[in-house]
Image (tube, helix red, strand yellow):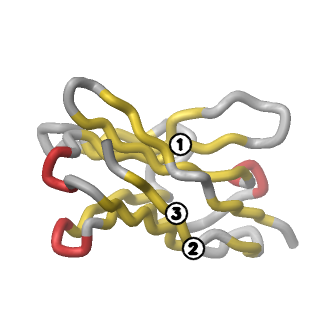
Amino acid sequence: QVQLVESGGGLVQPGGSLRLSCAASGNFASIYAKGWYRQAPGKQREFVAEITSGGGFNYADSVKGRFTIHSESAKNTWYLQMNNLKHEDTAVYYCNAVTPPYVSSWGRGTQVTVSS
């Protein structure tokens, strides 16, 4: 299992950008999937983006073309670059790591608010 800490959230105007970071401690090399999820008020947590065990990338349809996930192994960190933010992107964003034998770890979340 790994420990995850998110950062980079904040208040941004519609059309703006933010970059979220997820710093992992523990056995980073054991992580075979890295992801981001979000939870808006009154809604269930939903998938946003992931880097798969094979190095592929998956995105929710609602963020395709606007969000990019990437990882820097040397820093034990992965990121979510969010561009052209919309009101509906307002949520608490959580990073997620999956380690063998399919143990899912979560951070505490970082708030993203898109408002004019």
Q: Which residue is mark 2?
A: 8
Q: Amino acid at mark 3?
A: Glu
Residue behind mark 3: 6
Nearer-N-terminus badge (1/2): 2
Q: Residue at x 68, y 41 (%)?
A: 39
- For marks 1 and 3 on the same chain, the one whose residue lies earlier in the sequence: 3
In three-dimensional space, the C-alpha distance between marks 2 and 3, rounded to whole angstroms, equals 7 Å
Evaluate if marks 2 and 3 touch, with contact meaning CB atoms under 8 Å apart: yes
The answer to whether 91 is drawn above or below residue 77 in the figure is above
* Image quadrant in which the C terminus is located: bottom right
Nearest to the observer: residue 19 or residue 85:
19
Q: Which residue is mark 1?
A: 37
Q: Would residue 97 be found to the left or right of residue 16 on screen? A: left
Q: x%, y% of residue 55? A: 15, 45
Q: Which corner quadrant of the image does residue 112 belong to?
A: bottom right
Crowding at dot 1, Cα within 10 Å, few <14 / some 14-19 / many 20+, comes out as: some
Q: Amino acid at mark 1?
A: Tyr
| Residue at 27% over, 56% down | 26
Circle 1 — which element?
strand
Q: Residues within 10 Å of mark 3 (few under 14, many from 20)?
A: many
Horizontal and vertical percent position of residue 54: 12, 38
Q: Can you name the residue that lies furthest to the top here?
A: 101
Q: Nearer the viewer, residue 70 or 111?
A: 111
Q: Position of residue 7 (x, y in %)?
A: 55, 70
* Mark 3: secondary structure: strand
With respect to residue 107, does 61 lie above or below?
above
